[in-house]
Amino acid sequence: MALLAFVLTISLMLLIVIVVVYAERKVAAFMQDRLGPTEAGPYGTLQPLLDVLKLLQKEDIIPAAADKKMFAVAPILIFAAVFAGFAVIPLSPSLVPAGVGIGVFYLLAIISLDVIGLLMAGWGSNNKYAMLGAMRSVAQIVSYEIPAGLALLSVVMICQSLDFQEISYQQGVLMNLFPGLEQEQNWLFGLKALGFETTTVGGLTTWNIFRAPILLVAFVIYFIASLAECNRAPFDIPEAESELVAGFHVEYSGFRFATFFLAEYAMMVLVCLVAVILFLGSWNTPLPNFGPLALANWTTGTPGGMASVLWGGFWLISKTLVLLFVQLWARWTYPRLRVDQLMHLCWKVLTPIAIGLVLLAGIWRLLMV
Amino acid sequence: MDKSVVKHKVGFWDVVKSLVSGAKLTLQHFLHADKRRKPMYISDENYFEQQEGLVTLTYPYEALPVPDKGRYRLHNEIDDCIVCDLCAKICPVNCITIESVKATEDIGVTSDGTKKRLYAPTFDIDMAKCCYCGLCTTVCPTDCLTMTPVYDFPEVDIKNMVYHFTDLTPEQADEKKQLLEKQQEEMAAAKAAALAARKQQG
C-alpha cells in the first residue's frame, strides 16, 4: 500500500511537472508573441521529455575542488524534501498517501529541509557564485517562510485542525461524513449571526476564502510568499537568468542538474496544491447546490466510490493548474525585485499584515461557533 | 518649456493598479496567440499593420518572400564569361579565384557578342567569404556574374561553400594547357627558324 502510494504520487508529480515545463515554455512564448516549441511532437509537446533525455545523456561533472560527498547528496536531499511534502496531500475524499493528523506542520517542517540542501549545494560546489547564490536563496526562503507560515496559521485557526484531509472535508458538502465533524455546521462567510447555513449548499460558499473572507488576504499573502519560496519570478534574484549564471546549481550538470530542475518545478506544484487545499476548497467542487439543482452533489460523488476519486482529482488538479498558470503569468509580466525591495516586502508589508490576520482569524473563529 | 512635474505615484492602490494593468497586458497577448503573422510580401497593405498575435514564422516551412531581383547568392554563367579577372581583382574579400588558359583555337562568342579568348580551368567563388557587396557584378563586362534571390544555402562541410563554376573537367583543362604549350613551342620554333634564316641572309 505504501509502495502504491509512492508510485502513484511520484508519477502524478512527474506528469504535472512535465505539463508545467511545457506550459511554461508555451505560455512564455505566447505572452511574448512567439511560437514556443513546435518541432518535437505535435505542437512541441515532447519537448520537456526530450529535454530530460538530453540532460540524462550529459556528462556528470564533479569539480575537482568540490566537497564530493556534499555535492552528491545535495540534489537528492532537495528533491527528497520536496517530494516528502507530497505525502500528506489528499488527492480526493478517500485517497491520501499519508493521512497524518499534523499534516500542515509536517509539510512546513519538511519543506524547510530544502534550505539545507541549497546550502550544501552552494558550499559543496566550492564556487563563490554558487555559494553567494545559495546564501541569497536561503535568506529569501527563510524570510518568506514567516509570512507564509503565518498565513497558513490563520487557516489552521479557522479550521481548528492541522490535518489536510479534515480541512478539505470542512470546505464542502461532505463535511459531516468526516469522523469528528458529524455535528459541525457551515455558515455563510462563517458568520452564524447571518443565519444562512451552507453545510448542505457546498460549492464555492464553503471554500475557506468564503467561510472566512479574511482568508482571501491570507491567500494573497501565501501566494506571494510561495512565489518567493520557490525562487520564482518576480522573486528570482538568486537565479536571475538574465543577470547571474544560475545561482547555487551553477556547477551541476546532467542527472544532478535534472534533479534540481525537477525539485524546483515539483516545489511550484506543491505550493500551489497547498494553496488550493487550504484556501480554494481542496478537492471540493466549486458548484453549489441550488435546491433541486444539486450541482455540488452531482460533481462530488460519495466517498469511497470511484466517482469521488475522479471528481476529487479533477477539481484539485484543475484548480492547481490555474494557480500554476498564474505563477507563469506573473513570471512573464513582472520585473524582478531588488534585494532591498524583496526584504522590504517581506518584513515590513507581508509579515505585519499576516500577524494581524492571525489575530483577526482568532476573532472570526469565535463568530463561527 | 513644459514645467509640469510628473507625479510619481507610490500609494498602495496605485501599485495594485499598475500590477493589474501589467497583468492585463500580458494576458491580452496570451489570448491573441491564436492569430499569426502570414508570410506576406512587403508590398502587401497589411505588412506593417499587424498589431496582435504571434509574429514568428516557422522558417523552413514558411518564409517572408524576398524580391524577385533580390541580390544574395552569386551565380556565374560560365558560357558568357570571358575570364577577364575583373571580378577577382575588385573583390574586397578575395573570395573569387580564377585561373585562365589562352585558347588555341576559336571558342566562340558570348551571348552579347564579345569574343571569348580564354578558358577558365578554375572559377571558384567562396560563398563563405562573400560579403554580398555586389562590386563584382558591376564590373563584369558581359554581365555573366549576377546575384540571385537564393539566400538559404548552408552546408554541413565548409568545403562545400566553395562553388566551382568552371565548365572544364581537370582532364580537359590539362589538354588545353598542353595544346597551348605545344602551340607556344611551335611558335617559338617558328620564330627561332625565322631568326636563323634572317641571320643566314644577313
Image (cartoon, coloured by chain):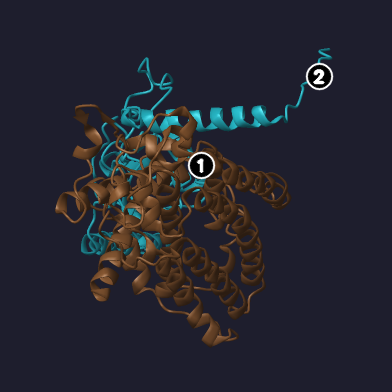
Is the N terminus of chain A in the top left, top right, bottom left or bottom right quadrant? Answer: bottom left
Choose between A228 and A25: the one closer to the eye: A228
Mark sitting on residue A330:
1
Whether A218 is drawn above or below A82: the answer is above
Looking at the image, residue B18 sits to the left or right of residue A333; the answer is: right
- Residue at 68 percent across and 46 percent down: it is A345
> Callout 1 environment at 10 Å: few (<14), some (14 to 19), or many (20+)?
some
Q: Colour of chain B?
A: cyan
Looking at the image, residue A362 sits to the left or right of residue A166; the answer is: right
Q: Colour of chain A?
A: brown
Choose between B168 and B130: the one closer to the eye: B130
Q: The disc labelled 2 sits on which kind of residue? A: Val
Quickly name the residue at label 2: B5
Q: The disc labelled 1 sits on which kind of residue? A: Ala
- Residue at 46 percent across and 59 percent down: it is A162
Choose between A182 and A285: the one closer to the eye: A182
